[in-house]
Structures are given as structure tokens and as C-alpha cells.
Image (tube, rainbow, N blue to C red):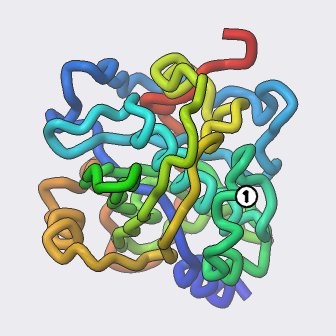
Amino acid sequence: MTKRFATMLAATSLLGVCAMTACSTPSTPTPSSSSAAITSNINGPYQLPDNIGTTFRWTAAPGIDLLSPIAVVTRAFIESDYIKTISQFRGAYPGWYRVVAGQPRFMESATRYVAPVNGTVYHRLQKVQRLPHNEWSTVACTYKYDATTTRQPDGRFLALRHSSYSTEILWRQTSDSKIDYRAVGQGTARYPVTDVFTGWTVIRSAPQHIEDISAAEACRDPRNDPAPYGTHRTEETYVDQPAEALPPYPGWARAGD
């Protein structure tokens, strides 16, 4: 049963990527790698599913600001897909189900078992491109399972083997939003309480799908993989302790901030 669960989890869409390296721009706050206990799953009216014991840490290709509006909505989109994938379609951020309403493939894959997942999920925002007609193209890299563990039914912790992929999203900004993205898109919380997708819609996207070959190659470049040394496993393995959840980066504002 353990192998079966691991195979299902490894086959599902979106687990997160990216590095805290020199790729961060000066306009983005400096990440901290210090250990800290993760915050509660409750942050205002929205709350994470109980099985989510992970934090998300992002980096970006040079010149990309992780606090810009398009970066904030992309981060929220990718994190939401990770959450719903391992929580049987539950718990995506406010507004996410609305923006994926026309993209049915995002609602086709989820793990069969809702297992507790712990650790740090890494992402990299590799591409942000403004297009005509208020459209944007973004690419996010995902380095899944590098620094996370799942608790098995027998109480042991399973660390899955390393893999990576990329997801391309074509956005359209349908209206101006009054959201202060720089305020909302950073902080100590693991997830937002604001519907950051207000004024945005997804024109085209699919889990683990990308047409920009150069961006996909950049995602596969091991120099862009942010996970700590020693977590790039070639085989599944059992470990004694759950993986550590580092502070989120850039994180999200707490309710009331």
C-alpha cells in the first residue's frame, strides 16, 4: 500500500519549486533560511487543509520581481494547485477555483489518499512576459519532493525521489484591482487571505505543460534547483523525521496586516 500511495503521489500535478539564490531582485525582500516552526493552518476566514504541513519558498530569474501583481497571482496559482492536488481538490486559495473554471485539466488529478505532508516546497518563477491586449505569459518551475515527506499509514515518513517540471500560464487582466500586491504578497503567513485573483483570468494552462522550450530548459538546469544539498534523491526512501518546513518566502501578509 505504501508503494501504491507513493506512485500515485508522484504521478499527480503540481508540487513546488524554486530557489533562494542570487536570482532574487533588489526589489524583493531578502529570504531567511533560518529554521522556524510553521504557523497555524488558520489565517483569517480561509484555512489550509489539515494535512498541509508545508511552506513555499520562491526565487525568480534575474529581473523578475516576486512582488509584482503578475508574480503574486502566479505564485498563488501554483501554490493552490499543489494544495488541491494532495488534498483531494480541497483548500486552494480564495478565487482559485474561479480562475481555473475554463481549464478542466486542473481538476482531473489529485491523490487518492490524503496523507500529511511536511517540509518545504520550492518554486522558481522563470518567465514573466507582457503581451498585447492586457495579456501575460508566465512560467513556473517545480522541483517536487526534494524537501518534503509524507506520513505513511504505518507512521513512517516517506521521502520521494527528485523530479522537476514546469507549468506555463497565459493570463488576461480583465480589470484594475485595488489590491496592494506588494503588501499582500509578502509576510510570515504561509498563504493569503485575500482573493489575489480579482481582476485576472486564466486563458490557457494545464498542469506540467509548457510550450516555451527555452524556459523549460532553464527549469531543468540543475543550477536553478534551489533545494538543499542532499535532498536530490534518486530513489524513494524512509526517514526517521518529517522534513523541516522553513519560513515561507516571500510569504503572505497575515490577516489584519
Q: Residue at x 65, y 58 (%)?
A: 99
Q: Residue furthest top?
A: 257
Q: Is residue 55 visible?
A: yes
Label 1: few (<14), some or many (≥20) within 10 Å?
A: few
Question: In the rendered image of this protein, does residue 25 appear above or below residue 8?
Answer: above
Give x and y (percent) for residue 103: 61, 75
Give the mark count: 1
Q: Residue at x 14, y 40 (%)?
A: 62
Which of the 4 quarters of the picture holds residue 223?
A: bottom left
Give x and y (percent) for residue 48: 77, 44
Question: In the rendered image of this protein, does residue 168 appear above or below residue 9?
Answer: above
Is 19 left or right of 102, judged from the image as shown?
left
Residue receiving disc 1:
98
Which of the 4 quarters of the picture holds residue 20?
A: top left
Q: Secondary structure at mark 1?
A: helix
Question: In the rendered image of this protein, does residue 101 appear above or below residue 11?
Answer: above
User: Which image quarter holds the C terminus?
Assistant: top right
Q: Residue at x 35, y 72 (%)?
A: 165
- Looking at numbered disc 1 in the image, what kind of residue is underneath it? Arg
Give x and y (percent) for residue 96: 68, 54
User: Which image quarter holds the N terminus?
Assistant: bottom right
Is 95 left or right of 44, judged from the image as shown?
left
Give x and y (percent) for residue 54: 60, 46
Q: Is residue 242 visible?
A: no
Q: Residue furthest right?
A: 45
Q: Residue at x 60, y 42 (%)?
A: 199
Camera-side residue of 249 and 132: 132
Question: In the rendered image of this protein, does residue 5 appear above or below residue 169?
Answer: below
